[in-house]
Image: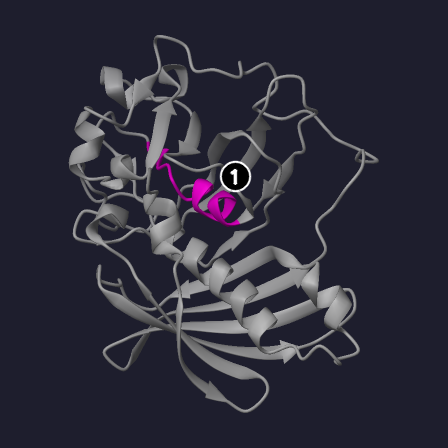
Amino acid sequence: MTSKITEVQELTEVARRGSDSITLRAHIDSTFTIGPKVHGGSLQMVVAKAARTALTALTAPEDKHAEAAAAMIPVAISSDYLTSPDAADIDLEITVRKRGRTVTVLSVDAVQLGRTVVASSVTMARPDSGTPHHSGPTVLDGVPVEPPATGIPLDGSPIAEVNHLGAAIDLVLDSETFPIARGETGEPLVRGWIRPKGVEPDEYFSVLVCDISTTGGDEPRSVRVGPDSPIDHLRPSPPGARLVAVRGDQLGGRPRHVRGGPPRGGLDRNSCRTVPAAGSDPFRKVDIS
């Protein structure tokens, strides 16, 4: 069985400039769109994979940081969305900004038709391991590993008319934290269960997860389509499906268009938390704000 998640991460080298710069090409099909434009989290997943691929390609075996670089994964991504990408070929122009034994930083510009559409900075480091020294309470504490019968699946729902990722992921939203489905208002918090179809989730899929859901606004038909400010991601990489919670820490007051409702709000700030939904495995929790 082929996986859309795997296919979208396939990269081809198209150019190399010196020892620290490379251009890779990806193809993003219409599966990874919200409405007519590319889903931001899907593109960030591709950016993360491109950063890892570039670091491998640009690190010589004799480099003093080669051993450390081989163990690194993307642990933080900050992206500025300059314009909305289209579902098509996209070039990823990657430059190593800093090499280190502990941390390496790369810039990744996503380019279409000669124009930078998304500019990202990717921090690479060795993944965390062992038992955390401290882990505080979260909004996912007590959430069951499997979604209940009352969950709202993406497949076959009205959400799928806008969110086209159903061919790539299984997503079920927690009905208790998605009151707009009942025509009601509620706290700007959405929880859910998500996993890729046809493949096990990895650290790259985890990047997509925290941009998969909207946060509810203060009107029954108001749905925030995502923060307007740069999105910062920090991800764990355990096996198994993911539980995800997206909270609107700030819903701004400047008038702007909100899909499905009147102009409301301005600069939003969301936080995201993911944990593996893996039976008895200990949850590794990460807070993003």
The residue sitting at 23% across, 54% down in the picture is 29
Neighbours of disc 1 within 10 Å: few (<14), some (14-19), many (20+): many
Q: Is residue 275 left or right of residue 187?
A: right
Task: Determine if the magenta segment contains residue 261.
Answer: no
Q: Please, what secondary structure does the residue beneath circle 1 have? A: strand
Residue at horizontal 26%, vertical 29%? 219
Membership of 205 in magenta stretch = yes
Relative placement, left or right, of 83 versus 197 is left
Judge whether residue 237 can be spotted in this image: yes
Amino acid under disc 1: Cys
Q: Residue at x 48, y 65 (%)?
A: 50
Quarter of the figure with the N terminus = top left
Name the outermost residue toward the top. Answer: 149
- Look at the picture and state if 85 lies above or below 38: below
List x then y, in percent, for residue 133: 84, 35
Q: Residue at the bottom extreme?
A: 18
Q: Nearer the viewer, residue 285 or 46?
A: 46
Does residue 67 appear to the left or right of 92 in the view shown? right
In this view of the protein, can residue 227 be seen by the observer?
A: no
- What colouring style does the render use? one colour
Residue 178, relative to residue 284: is it above or below? Answer: above
| Residue 122 rendering spot, x and y as whole percentages | 56, 65
Query: Closer to the camera, 70 or 242?
Result: 70
Residue name at image x 25 percent, y 51 percent: 256
The residue labelled by disc 1 is 272
Residue 190 image position (x, y, % from top left): 42, 28
Q: How many marks?
A: 1
- Give the residue furthest to the right: 133
Residue interval drawn in magenta: 204-217
Res 59 quadrant in image: bottom right
